Image (cartoon, rainbow, N blue to C red):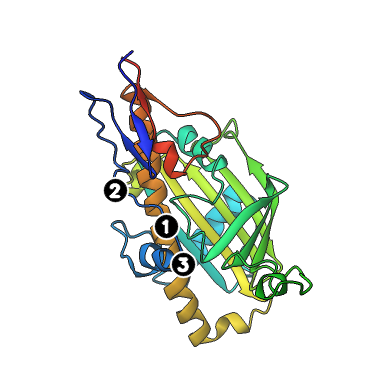
């Protein structure tokens, strides 16, 4: 075994004579609210991810696909937003990495929207604006604290950790119900093999799908200004999140296939420290 490298200040330094060529090199981790804004709102992602519906018929086609694959009807939701990105790594590998995702990572705007599992379980996730879930106690010492209502909550509807026997898409997914905030509907993380007829070339195709009505009111979702503001923010953040997941997963997979192995398990996937790989050859 060659001499191991070291890491400090969230950056890995290979041992002398060892060269790392990992795609996530230069993928900076946000250190505060301003860098969240820079990396996830102002930065234009390299790969566009939003699936645009040119016609009502095309939206209907995607709605049927979602119903077939997730067994849930999205026609009741005014907003149907789907993002897709291809990842050069096996489907199961990408899905396993996503299951270890703790949201406190290089792939998520942690300071703008602090998200995390309740009781360390992915079945229940809460998201708070700016991470402030107890306001008064932080404003002035001695004031009573109270739990604020989160932006929204995610509660598991169904997790599919392996494909169905007759599933030609080789799909896995996490399906959630959104409640307790502005989106009332569903959110799904879906990974499948490429469909050659769709000219998809990467080994894994990752989808973030959300169908909802604003505060449960379908009419509110029809307001043009609400849609425009939400689309600008949500689509830019989601595109950057997916681009970072792509870069991370491809780098993680390459590091393993090139003979490197991950650091101890207490370094969560997506954490900047997870870029520490030691040469085994």
The residue at which mark 3 appears reads as: 33
* Residue appearing at x 36%, y 24% in the figure: 278
Say which quadrant the C terminus sits in.
top left
* Residue appearing at x 44%, y 39% in the figure: 273
* Marks 3 and 1, how far apart at CA: 8 Å
The answer to whether residue 64 is left or right of residue 139 is: left
Disc number for residue 236? none
x and y percentages locating residue 121 in the rendered image: 69, 44
* Residue appearing at x 60%, y 36% in the figure: 161
Q: Mark 3 or 2 closer to N-term? A: 2
Say which quadrant the N terminus sits in.
top left
> Judging from the image, what secondary structure is the residue with disc 1 in?
loop
x and y percentages locating residue 87 in the rendered image: 37, 43
x and y percentages locating residue 54 in the rendered image: 39, 71
Observer-nearest of 239 and 193:
239
Number of dots carrying numbers:
3
* Residue appearing at x 53%, y 51% in the figure: 104
The residue at which mark 1 appears reads as: 30
Report which quarter residue 266 is drawn in. Answer: top right
Observer-nearest of 191 and 149:
149
**Crowd band around label 3 with a 10 angstrom C-alpha radius: few (<14), some (14–19), many (20+):** some
Report which quarter residue 83 is drawn in. Answer: bottom left
Does residue 274 appear anywhere in the picture?
A: yes
Please determine whether, in this image, residue 25 is positioned above or below residue 41: above
The residue at which mark 2 appears reads as: 26
* Marks 2 and 1, how far apart at CA: 12 Å
x and y percentages locating residue 141 in the rendered image: 71, 72
């Amino acid at each position: 075994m060659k001499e191991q490298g070291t890491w400090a200040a969230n950056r890995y330094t290979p041992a002398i004579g060892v060269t790392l060529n990992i795609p996530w090199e230069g993928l900076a981790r946000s250190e505060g609210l301003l860098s969240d804004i820079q990396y996830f709102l102002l930065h234009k992602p390299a790969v566009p991810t939003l699936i645009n519906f040119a016609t009502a018929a095309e939206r209907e086609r995607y709605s049927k696909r979602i119903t077939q694959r997730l067994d849930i009807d999205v026609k009741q939701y005014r907003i149907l937003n789907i993002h897709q990105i291809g990842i050069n790594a096996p489907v199961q590998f990408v899905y396993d990495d996503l299951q270890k995702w703790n949201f406190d990572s290089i792939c998520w705007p942690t300071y703008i929207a602090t998200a995390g599992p309740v009781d360390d379980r992915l079945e229940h996730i809460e998201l708070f604006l700016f991470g402030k879930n107890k306001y008064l106690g932080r404003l002035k010492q001695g004031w009573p604290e109270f739990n604020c209502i989160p932006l929204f909550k995610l509660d598991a509807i169904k997790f599919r950790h392996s494909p169905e026997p007759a599933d030609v898409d080789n799909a896995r997914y996490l399906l959630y119900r959104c409640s307790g905030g502005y989106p009332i509907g569903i959110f799904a993380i879906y990974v499948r093999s490429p469909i050659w007829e769709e000219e998809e070339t990467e080994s894994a195709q990752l989808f973030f799908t959300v169908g909802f009505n604003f505060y449960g009111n379908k009419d509110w979702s029809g307001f043009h200004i609400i849609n425009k503001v939400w689309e600008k923010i949500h689509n830019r953040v989601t595109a950057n999140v997916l681009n970072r997941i792509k870069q991370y997963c491809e780098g993680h997979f390459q590091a393993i296939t090139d003979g490197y192995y991950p650091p101890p398990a207490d370094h969560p996937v997506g954490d900047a420290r997870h870029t520490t790989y030691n040469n085994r050859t």
